Image: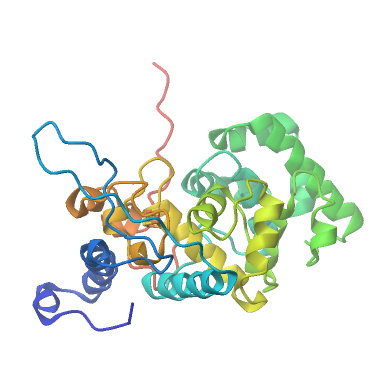
Amino acid sequence: MNATPEKPAAAKKAVTKKATAKKAVAKKAAAAAGQAPAKKTAAGKAAPAKKSTAKTAAGKTPAKKAPARKPESRVAMVRRARRINRELAELYPYAHPELDFTNPFELLVATVLSAQTTDLRVNQTTPRLFAVCPTPEDMAAMPPEKLEELIRPTGFFRAKTKSLIGLSAALRDRFGGEVPGRLEDLVTLPGVGRKTANVVLGNAFGVPGITVDTHFGRLARRFGWTTAEDAEKVEADVAEIFPKSEWTMLSHRVVFHGRRVCHSRKPACGACAIAPLCPAYGEGETDPEKARKLLKYELGGQPGQRLKPPADYPGQPAPPMAPPVAAS
Ligand code: SF4
């Protein structure tokens, strides 16, 4: 996919700069969706293969069975993987971490809170939390029940409170109140695993890291970059495909695509810009119209997850948390 300008007809419709940016992104996905069925995937699979080959109830001729796929060489897979990364970079030039933070400590806390919940919910919760305890010293000194109340909307609030107080005390006592910039130190903090450590390293310290969350793991398997389920194995497999300098942004792009297009249960294959490069094309909805309705966040015209997104984000910011309803 090239960074070609919008077609004149579509460009005429754009009325504001922001609207144009949004449209360009949505259009890219939609345009690719329209092309996908005609192309053969780089993995050697016929992209448009419909799911069923049995005669339909309406008596229509069933779609032909996709020809058997030739096994892909390692070199071809790596080439295809890097092309996916380039195409995702064009599709999401504004890819970024979707947790709001202003310093390494806030990012560390937000990442711990993001387990088993959405970044949106974390972003709606942290403004109050960081207003009350902005430093590790403040957080370590918080009475657990008070902290539990503050982070309750993110779920699993008792376990997360324990982690936050533990990691804040460790930062205070072992690291002079600063978040360390080394993986081997970060993973010694309570509640901090490789995923959290890599998020912090990549986004607060500029140290390249691959962040294997649920989206990244799922897409890496769909792309054929790995067959592993274990996050550490996925990380190791993907690290062998891409240069280190790409790791952090690759993680953001893949996660962006997973959240917007390649969903867990219903991937929007028919509106996916990288369908011709994806061996898993057809796992989800292939009808372009139906697939477009599955797109989320800025691609679906919805608010994003950050309350304060970066300036180049073409969507709307997320709304703050609604005030609690008073008990009657
Ligand atoms: S499985 Fe995901 S990446 Fe592959 S074509 Fe479908 S939506 Fe796109």
**Left-right relation of 254 to 29:** right
Residue sitting farthest toward the top = 328
Q: Could you say which quadrant of the image residue 278 lies in?
A: bottom left
**Looking at the image, which is closer to me, 138 or 90?**
90
**Residue 205 pos. (x, y %):** 70, 71
Q: In the image, is residue 34 above or below residue 109?
A: below
**Residue 141 pos. (x, y %):** 79, 42
The answer to whether one can see residue 141 in this image is no
Q: Measuring 62% from the left and 54% from the top, which residue is drawn there?
A: 212
Q: Measuring 26% from the left and 48% from the top, which residue is drawn there?
A: 50
Location of the C terminus by quadrant is top left
Q: Measuring 23% from the left and 76% from the top, which residue is drawn there?
A: 17
The answer to whether one can see residue 10 in this image is yes
**Left-right relation of 100 to 93:** right
**Residue 75 pos. (x, y %):** 57, 74
What color scheme is it? rainbow
**Looking at the image, which is closer to me, 233 or 208?**
233
**Left-right relation of 206 to 10:** right
Q: Could you say which quadrant of the image residue 281 lies in?
A: bottom left
**Circle count:** 0
Location of the N terminus by quadrant is bottom left
Q: In the image, is residue 204 above or below residue 194?
A: below
**Looking at the image, which is closer to me, 5 or 327?**
5
Q: In the image, is residue 261 above or below residue 23?
A: above
**Residue 93 pos. (x, y %):** 42, 74
Residue sitting farthest toward the right = 174
**Looking at the image, which is closer to me, 139 or 13?**
13
Quadrant containing ligand 1 reads: bottom left
